[in-house]
Image (cartoon, rainbow, N blue to C red):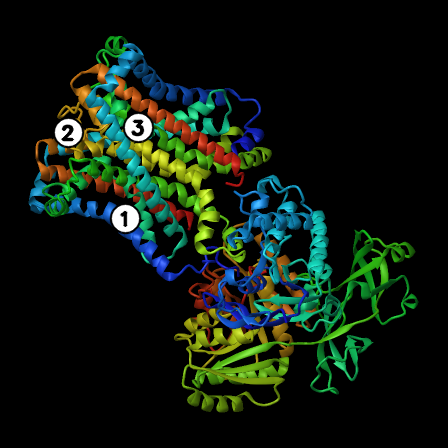
Amino acid sequence: MTASQARLRGAAPEPGWGTWAVRGAALTYLTVLLILPLFVIAQDGLRAGLAGLWRAVTLPVAWQALRLTLWTAALMAILNAGMGTLTAFVLVRYEFPGRDWLNLLIDLPLAVPTLVTGVMLVILYGPQGALGGWLESTFGWRVIFAPPGIVLALLFITFPFVVRALQPVLEALDRAQEEAAVTLGANAWTTFWRVVFPPLLLPLTTGTLLSFARAIGEFGSIVIVAGNIPLFSQTAAVYVFGEVESENRLGASAVSLVMLALAFVLVMLVDWLQRRRRSVSPQA
Amino acid sequence: MSIQLEQLTKRYEGHPVVNQVSLEIADGEFFVLIGPSGSGKSTVLRMIAGLTSVDAGRIWLHGRDVSQAAPQARGVGFVFQHYALFQHMSVADNVEFALRVRKAAPVERRRRRDELLDLVGLAGLGQRMPNQLSGGQQQRVALARALAHRPSVLLLDEPFGALDAKIRVDLRRALRRIQTELGITTIFVTHDQEEAFELADRIGVMNFGRLLEVGPPSELYQRPQTEFVATFLGTANLLVGQCVAGSVRLGPVHFPLNTEALPLDTPNTPQRVQVLFRPEDVAVAAAPEALNCPQLGPGVVEQCVFAGSSERLTLRLPPLPTVRPIAPPVAFGDNSLLVEAARLQDQTRRLPLQPGDRVWVGVRRIHALAHPGLSFLIPTDGSPAALAALEVGGQIARLAHARVTLLGYGAAPTVLERHLQTAKERLGSGLAALELRVSAEPLGDAIAAEVERQPADLVIQGFHPAGGVALAEQTLRGGEHHVLLVPAEKNPGTPTRALVCVTGSEPAKNDVLFTGRLVRHLGAEATLLCVLPAAPVEADAHERAERFLAGGVRTLAVLGVPAATKLQTGPVRDVIAHEMQAGHHDLLVLGAPLPERDGTISLRGLVGQMLTGLSGHQALIVRSEFLAA
Amino acid sequence: MRAPANAAPVRTGTWQRRLLIGLVLTYVTLLVVTPLAALVYGAFAEGLPALGQALSQPVVWAAFGRTLIVAVIVVGVHSVFGTALAWVMVRHRFRGQRWLNGLIDLPFAVSAVVVGYMLLLVFGRNGLLAPVLSALQWRVAFAFPGLVLATLFVTLPFMARELMPVLEAFGPEQEQAAATLGATGWQTFWLVTLPALRWGFVYGVTLTFARALGEFGAVLVVGGGIEGRTDTATVYIYRALEERQYVSAYGTALALGLLSLAVVYASTFIRRRYRGA
């Protein structure tokens, strides 16, 4: 059912005191937990005015941290979109031994604490690690304490996002549309791009944007994997942490505010896209 | 020939959903495939389009064998039930799709698209999105889309099933007009007989994966060859009567026989036939003199339904001796004969009727079908248990005029041939029809394969307390038949006193009915036993059970089976065992447990316990059709 | 019998299918399975006794205990308020709702470090509420309540987001049907709505719990990671790594990961089983 339908049918016409109590409690909860802290940090970050904020953000260390955060997250998002689509497609459309296990594995990154993810990657790819040592000695590739480690950690953490966004849509797709395309003479490739893919575009976009947003703020795994070398492998979240530890309030607030704004824009964008999707396809 | 199907077969999980369907459709013909849901008609259509692979058999389109061809290469147009329009494309893009993938020039695409939208009556709506159209309009777009690449064959899979009545009629007319205009060979799948009659040049009726009959609508309506087609197409009054020397008898009423096609083996001895007459063949008058056709007798108007141009009547007549109604079915617990009649407006005006009015009922014309009778399947592997089953089976089959298939299983053909010869001797002569089959498979698989070829009503098999329950389970698993278990140790002869154990539930009605159909031929009597737990769960359980038992007795009376009832409380198993002994019963009738989710039937519960406790009695396990219906 | 809905209509070549399946399986193995195996290997690298010794330290137990208490409190709070929130967002209409709807997802995207920092700004020594808190003699920052608050913030979306689609799909029809049958508001809620929400609720609880177990950044910033006071399991792992006590770090990480996995998979299995796939 669409949101607009729900609105039309609506709830009880005249909210009683119970309704108001529930509504009040829910909104108070949201305010104390969410809106108050947001308000405070906005105020704190803008204490020195927009110019002060700009200066704090464009400090070389802060600026590099933000750039590193953005490009690693973007690279991860692109890889994840491709592999996530493929995984969802294989999971929904093909029967093969181990499919149930694969399906369970998708949720694993959601269940494992990200800090533990970092630990795993360090053990595997670290200089003392089996794979890491080999990669470094053979190819001269450095994974841990370098940007590749960051991308790898982000890929692990956000793997479920795209898969789980696409899976239900793929399952709900009307197979008859593909059959129609086939009887009209389209080959498998054309059928996929012309018929299957277009409805997936929107959920793929929202899933990818969400994983991007999540990646920008990731801390637990990065702080372990990246090594936090300023100007080389220090991300924005780790930078903020350092500034908080060293009680540099302006630096912390400024970069926090930038990250917060990014998160806010992304979340609102996703929300808007999802609403649009619901209004476009009423049966979804 | 435009379309030719040869022995087309498709299985899902071992079950045939399409079973050896052969069909030829001429150029430009409008062919309608009709059947209840699950009859396999859509699967046939999908196989022709290449959307479902073919397990066996062949498909020719215009003389080309396309059985293994990819759907893209078959050049058919397919219209789906739920339109299957590409939701993200405009109407125009949908229609142009087939030309686009064929890389047609844009000018040609546009020209063709406009032509088609014009043809289906949607000119000028090309820029709309599918979800801006009504269901009927969407299906018109789907039709235009399916015609864009000039397919040689048009296939429609219940295309109007999701639409409301008025729009269906409009679309039907539009479709027929377009089909005639283009002269395109068309197969149209539906479960709606009105649609079939209106559209079809010829109709094919399917049920349980088989194509039962093919013919022009009027032919199938007036002269069906099978019970299923008679009752599925249109409303039918179908009764079992007798045929003797050129005339048909329904109890005391005689009809001249006007069907030559009736295949009678022995023209001079009375033979059972099914007698069909349609509601419009029924004449209703205030007095017997006013009927100028054979009379069924006086009746009471049960129901009057106004149906626009006509009026539908349900008439209740007293039972006719030796006549068993098939359709309309007798209501459980009722022994009268129901007849459906239809009258036109002018007749209604001449003799207005209301429920409760007494009238005389006559029949203007009848059509007789050969009565298929019961068919038995008797498996044998040469063991003593199997031999006991043969003797009883043969006796029952002779009494019931049943067709018998003898199935040797579980050994090499040469060994089985020998078994079958002895078995045939044991079975004795005088059977209506006897067929011998062999299979090297074990019991369950052998039966499954055999009933797939030729369904049976009843499987009669030997029963040994050790392992017998498991065998019975396998037999039930094989198909839709009931099972009669004959104990191995001695030959008990045909049953004379049946104990029918019933619960007061819907499936139990079926137990009573089938028992009646079987034991009426044996001259046996029946006792209906209902066992309630010592402390009934519901207060009125007693009363309901009594009502059910009384209904059962009336139903058995229609079938000519004298019956008594017993209502007892206590532990079910003990009460039944005691009653078997005390009442000198020699046949125990139990309802089969409802199937599990995977379709198998488990006898591990009460039924299995009762079976292992059998001491030399026969047991009939009746399959419930309640869930299948 | 109808054709199974997922029977492949298009005969894609088997080699294409094999290639795609192989690609996905390889990717998942390299990305997810190998690191997990590495963790198990790392924890047991110095033998079982060393691992046992590392895990039996009182510090580890205390940290785990703190994590569990925080998680349980958080789950309790969200069970009540998260359900109320979902209910209000789906069934009520008020101004600013669209913004709120977006805001619910914000904790999901905001960096945990930023969350911790925000809470410090509100509840810290020089924070917005500092005068109130000191008057009441409450310590939030660098104390246990801070841990709870931080975890509450980061787990905010899970309960509501699990319940909202269930509530939406459930629609008001059944509730209206109950009303026409004479049920009061409470009866409708208890007999009709709540049972329908059951599995969404279980899943919401599970995700909240798992996330609470694994929260690190916010807890580290707000709590300061004071040994014996505000160190949770994750904070302990971090410190152990800093101090190069690899066996304790890896062992604790493995234990925490397994606990979290067990919770999530248990609920998956229960849900699958009772839904009768």
Q: Which residue is mark 1?
A: C28
Circles 2 and 1 on the same subunit:
no
Q: Quadrant of the N terminus of chain B?
A: bottom right
Q: Callout 1: residue from which chain? A: C
Is B324 drawn above or below residue B265 in the view shown? Answer: above
Query: Quick one: label 3, few (<14), some, or many (20+) residues within 10 Å?
Result: many
Residue at point 23%, 10% (across, down): C134
Q: Foreground residue, B119 or A164?
A: B119
Q: What percent of the width, then of the height, locates residue A66?
A: 25, 26
**How many marks do you count on the picture?**
3
Query: Quick one: label 2, few (<14), some, or many (20+) residues within 10 Å?
Result: some
C132 on left or right of C99? left
Q: What percent of the width, then of the height, locates residue C11?
A: 44, 60
In the rendered structure, find residue A229 and report the number of the disc placed on it: 2
Q: Which residue is mark 3?
A: C154
Quarter occupied by residue C237: top left
Label 3 or label 1, whichever lies nearer to me, is 1
**Alpha carbon distance from label 3 to label 2:** 27 Å
Is C29 drawn above or below residue B572 in the view shown? Answer: above
Q: Secondary structure at mark 3?
A: helix
Q: Amino acid at mark 2?
A: Ile
Q: Amino acid at mark 3?
A: Val
Label 3 or label 2, whichever lies nearer to me, is 2
Residue at point 43%, 23% (across, down): C99
Q: Quadrant of the C terminus of chain B?
A: bottom right
Is residue B482 among what the camera can see?
A: no
Query: Marks 3 and 2: CB-CB under 8 Å?
Result: no
Q: Callout 2: residue from which chain? A: A
Label 2 or label 1, whichever lies nearer to me, is 2
Residue at point 38%, 22% (across, down): A30
**Alpha carbon distance from label 2 to label 1:** 30 Å
Q: What percent of the width, then of the height, locates residue B406?
A: 52, 83
